Image: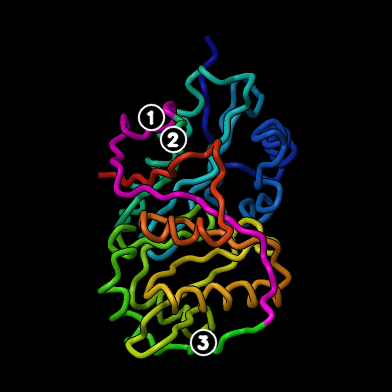
Amino acid sequence: MVTVQVRLASVRDREGILAISSRIWEGEDYIPQVLDRWLSEGGLFVAELGEKVVGFAKNTELSPGEVWLEGLRVDPAHQGKGVAKALARAQLEAALAKKPRSVRLATVEENLASLHIAQELGFREIARFSYLEADVVEPERLPTAEKPEPKAAWDFLQRSRSFAEARGLVGLGWRFRTLTFDFLTELCRDGNVFALGRGPSALLIVFPDPYTPEDILALAFLDGEETALEELLHVAHGLAARRGNRILSAMVADPWLYTFLSRRGFQGVPELGAVVVLEYR
């Protein structure tokens, strides 16, 4: 029996990786948009059977000591041969070798095979999110939103039910990163944080989708009083329209916020189900 071998990827593996990606999600995988960046960053692994690339996976350090495992793909013709488990184990070993503060990954609840592998390796569920998206509609009137000071925004987050439900994570596309005060300060400095009202009464954090930034603007965080949230949604639509984005996306852990967005044009993707975030313990 041929043993699965895992190694770091090189530029020579590019075509093999793209060939696998083309057979995933009916050819609508995001990997082609990010592959060149992943190859230059490092942390990209390939699995081989014989001399054929049959799978790949990526480790990304979202912040110092915060490792995210992503992009695990297996050629459909070679599933059930231990390829995914070999890749996941190699990812985890490489991550732990850096003595990180956290190692996390996400998968959808319907992907029982991935959940089983992750749990077998020592990962445990810490949060669940629903993925929602809406077409961008440029508002006729753009509300005036404030750019809050980091301390005011941070104080709001500490009172936020949505932030607590998300376990302090913000969804950046299909990645989930811990929102620390330093990261929030960076987001405020870059003009990605908006607030309305005294206190403030509502807070919005936007972030270009790391996989398809030209198409999607991610609502990394949204919470507050309902009337103010309505206004901030207009801000998000207006901002996305100016940037040329077609879609607003959101990863939502709070059931109330899910209902709020669903009533305002956001829809889920039925085949995805819940997005489960797991952390190595």
Q: Which of marks 1 and 3 is in front?
A: 3
- What amino acid is at disc 2? Ala
Q: Which of marks 3 and 2 is nearer the N terminus?
A: 2
Residue designated by label 3: 145
Q: Residue 176 carries which label?
A: none
Rounded to the nearest angstrom, the CA distance separating label 1 from label 2 is: 8 Å
Foreground residue, 38 or 7?
38
Foreground residue, 187 or 98?
187
Crowding at mark 3 (Cα within 10 Å: few <14, some 14-19, many 20+): some
Residue designated by label 1: 117
Q: Callout 3: helix, strand or loop?
A: loop
Image coordinates of residue 14 in percent, x first then y, are 71, 42
Residue designated by label 2: 88
Q: Which of marks 1 and 2 is in front?
A: 1
Foreground residue, 257 or 90?
257
Image coordinates of residue 244 in percent, x first then y, are 73, 70
Magenta segment: 112-140
Image coordinates of residue 210 in percent, x first then y, are 59, 60
Q: Are marks 1 and 2 in contact (CB under 8 Å)?
A: yes
Residue at x-position 25% and y-position 74%? 159
Magenta segment: does it hold 278?
no
The part of the image, by quadrant, that contains residue 114 is top left
Q: In this view, does 139 lie above or below 215?
A: below
Residue at x-position 60% and y-position 42%? 9
- What amino acid is at disc 3? Ala
Q: Which of marks 1 and 2 is nearer the N terminus?
A: 2
Q: Are marks 1 and 3 in contact (CB under 8 Å)?
A: no
- What amino acid is at disc 1? Ile
